[in-house]
Image: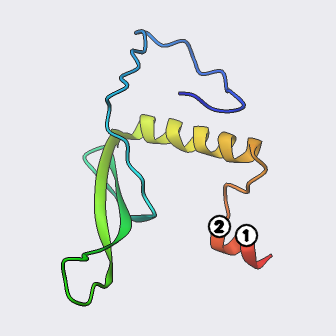
Amino acid sequence: MKMHPPIQPPVPDAPLIDNMFAPELLAGGLSGLSLINGIVTITLENPRADHARPDPVLERVVVGRGGMPVPIAQALLCALYQFLSQHRLNPLMAQSEQHRQ
């Protein structure tokens, strides 16, 4: 996991092989979360317009889902908290709330 400034992750049991061809997602929003059978699933969305229509309208389109066991979701939460804090962003406040203050 690359971060700037870097954090010191625990030593993994297996080496990390960086895949340059792994798909990347750009998400403009979070559609939802679910917890089923110990798997946390996150659904991501992005605004899109269908320009093939005569009057295109902006729609929220699901762009991906990610699932992970609870311990991995907890590790992700901790890593995001630390990363945002290092960049002087309040990890417990949504961006829209930060602009109001």
Numbered badge on residue 95: 2
Asked which quadrant contains residue 89, the reply is bottom right
Q: Position of residue 77 (x, y in %)?
A: 55, 44
Q: Residue at x 36, y 63 (%)?
A: 45
**Disc number placed over residue 74 in the picture, else none:** none
For residue 32, say whether it is visible: no
Q: Which residue is mark 1?
A: 98
Task: Label 2, secondary structure: give it.
Answer: helix
Q: What's the amino acid at mark 2?
A: Gln
The one of 73 and 21 positioned closer to us in this rendering: 21
Which quadrant of the figure has residue 57? bottom left
Instruction: State how many labels appear.
Output: 2
* Scheme of colours in the image: rainbow
In terms of depth relative to the viewer, which is nearer, 59 or 85? Answer: 59
**Can residue 93 be spotted in the picture?**
yes
Q: Residue furthest bottom?
A: 55
Residue 97 percent across, percent down from the top left: 68, 74
Q: Residues within 10 Å of mark 1 (few under 14, many from 20)?
A: few
**Residue at x 80%, y 75% (from the top left corner):** 101
| Location of residue 48 (image quadrant) | bottom left
Give percent across and percent down for residue 92: 67, 59
Q: Are marks 2 and 1 in contact (CB under 8 Å)?
A: yes
Q: Note whether 73 is above or below 5 in the view shown.
A: below
Q: SS at mark 1?
A: helix
Q: Position of residue 11 (x, y in %)?
A: 54, 12
Q: Amino acid at mark 1?
A: Gln
What's the CA distance linking mark 2 and mark 1? Answer: 5 Å
Q: Reply above or below: 51 against 8.
A: below
Which residue is pictured at 32% across the width and 46% down the height? 66
